[in-house]
Structure formats: C-alpha cells, structure tokens
Amino acid sequence: QAQDQDHKIMVLHLGSRRVLAGGIVAAAASWAITSTLRAPAGLARASCLAGMGSANLEEVRKNAERMHRIYHPGFEFPEWSLRLIKDPESFERLAAAVTVYYREGDSKEEVMDVATFREPVNIAMGRYYDAKALGEAFGYSHGAYAKSSRLNLMPNIAIYCLTPMRRGDEWTEAHVINVIGFAFDSPQQPDYQYFLPCREGDAKWNELVARFSQMWRYIFQCARDKRLKRVYLADVGGGAFSGGLDSEGPGYLKLKDQSLGPILHEFSDIEVKQLPRIPDFAFSAEGRKKLHESLLVNAWDPWSMVGNGNAKDNSLDGFFGRCTAMALLCWPMTNPWLRCQAVKSMY
C-alpha cells in the first residue's frame, strides 16, 4: 500500500477505434512531414493503436511489416520478430506485460506522443530510414522529441518488456527495461541545447541531476513492481551520449554519482550488478540461473525505436535490438495491450 502511494497506474482503455492503415489520423501528416514541426493535437489519444484490440492482429502485422521496410537496409529489427505476431497467444502474453513508465505530473498526451512517434533509427542525429515512407505509412516523419526546445523538454520515459532473446538457435526470455539517458552526443540534440553549458551547483546542473534520478527511479520501481530481485545496471547516458557533458559540464561520472546514490539507498533491498555482454550473458551459466528474477537495463534513445540501428549499431541498444523483439513489443502501433504507469516525481 505504501508503494501504491508513490505511483499511480493508468491503464489505457483501448475501446473500439481502429488505426487507419495509411496513418494514425490525417492531421498527422501535416505535423511531421513539414520541416517545422507542429504539435499533433489529439494524436496521443489516437495513439496506443487507438484501441485496436486482439481482433485486429492483422493491423498489428501490417504496421510491423511497414515499419520494417522503412529502415535503411541492415538497420532494421530482426525479421524473426515479425513471425512472433503470427502466434497470437504468445504475442499477446508478451505484449500485455509491457509497461511505459513516466514521471507523475507529466502530460499523458505527451508521454504517449514520445512512446508512439518514434524514428526507426537516429544515431547522433543521423537518420538511417526513409522519412518520406514513414510519413506516408504512419503520418509522421520525425520523432516527437523534436517538440522539445531550449526552454522545455518532452517527457522522459522508460519501457519495460518481457521479450524473447535469441543467440543463434538458442532462445530464452528476459525482463528488460529500456531507459532513455539525456543525449549530449551532438549540439543538435535538444538535451544538449537545454542543459549545456552547465557547472556543478547551478540551476541547470541541479535539474539534470534530478532528472537523472528520475530515470534511475524508473528502473528500481519497475524491479519492485515486477518482484525482481536484482538489477543488471548499464551506464545509461554514458559513453558516446555523454561527450558534450564531459566537455561543457561536470561530466558523466559526477552526474551518475550524484543522481544514482539516493536511489540505491532508497531501494537497498534490490541487488545491483553491472550488466554483462548481451546476449551472451543470457545464455551463460549465471544468466540461465538468474535471468527469470533479474531486470536487465538497456540504454535507449530519445528518438528511435527500441534497438535503434540494430545490427549496424554497436551501442548497447543495438545489441539488445538485434537479439530481441522489443522494437515491436514496445511500440504502441504494434502493441495495443501496453499500459502506462506514473512514478513518484523527483523534481
């Protein structure tokens, strides 16, 4: 009961409306195909498959195949994940477990915009997909994170998924949470423009620490919600993502230390380990023993589908994408069963 006071569950009631095969709503095209993005009024309510439901798995399949073709060759999510949809019982079981975590108080419409309007691939603001085809198929050509500005950022979200994981002919299932670090890998990134430059102790730095704490909280709240004993943690927001922060701010290590410490103290009942190599860990002796009671952390992107560039992306997200079905399970246009859950605000 105490935990329930810290977060509220908002289950999306899916109703009986359908997603149009040629796009979500006609107004969407005018939002995202233009060079100046305008807010897609009402699209969040029309997203999450607008209540497509299990009777419309054919629409799920069509949306999945359309998106798969829009990637540039070699960047697409695994073809075998398309076949998962042809097994309704298995697909619906996995799809119903997916949970979108967001900060309590954030706009639910904007949360669903960020979850729904995803670019197939965005690597350091390089877009490796057919933007015209994306607009024609789904009514948008760039991600909802483009609605961020120097004065305001779109919501930061995370998506939990129980997913098949494959290595060659070996298969298993894994609990994964896809968490979005703030992106400082290019001056074109909205996060870069919003936060940098900054210094330790100034208002922007303090806000960044609080927002990062919120991001870490999604992980540990999810582990508690799903009754998982341990978290295999990644350096979300580190590596290539932290370049600008290391040069124009106090740096990633200091940010991680200040933002993660209070969360580890609050969730001290959950074991924390460093994430090993994916997917090899899942098929190791330790992985086979502990995977069913552990939460793996993927460092996702504010723009892209889960997995981003997949086999042509050597980031952690790319390694997760090429061996799982998360691109389809975590996208509202191919998962009408996902739900959203608010998490206690850190700022």
Image (cartoon, rainbow, N blue to C red):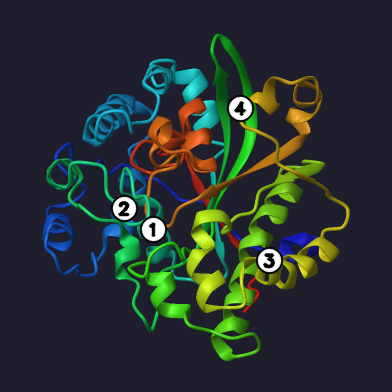
Q: Amino acid at mark 4?
A: Pro
**Which badge, 4 or 3, comes first in the chain's sequence?**
3
State which mark lies toward you, 4 or 3: 3
The residue under the point 32% across, 30% down is 60
Q: Which residue is mark 3?
A: 253
Q: Is residue 41 something that shows in the picture?
A: yes
In the drawing, does residue 7 fall left or right of residue 60?
A: right
Q: Is residue 182 something that shows in the picture?
A: no
Residue lying furthest top = 169
* Tags 2 and 1 touching, CB below 8 Å: yes
Q: Residues within 10 Å of mark 3 (few under 14, many from 20)?
A: few
Distance from label 4 to label 1 (Cα)?
Answer: 27 Å
Please state the horizontal and vertical placement of residue 256, each as a whole percent of the image: 69, 66
State which mark lies toward you, 4 or 1: 4
Q: Which residue is mark 1?
A: 114
Which quarter of the image is occupied by the N terminus?
Answer: bottom right
Distance from label 3 to label 2 (Cα)?
Answer: 31 Å
Q: Which residue is mark 4?
A: 279
**Of residues 177 and 1, the one drawn nearer to the viewer in this rendering:** 177
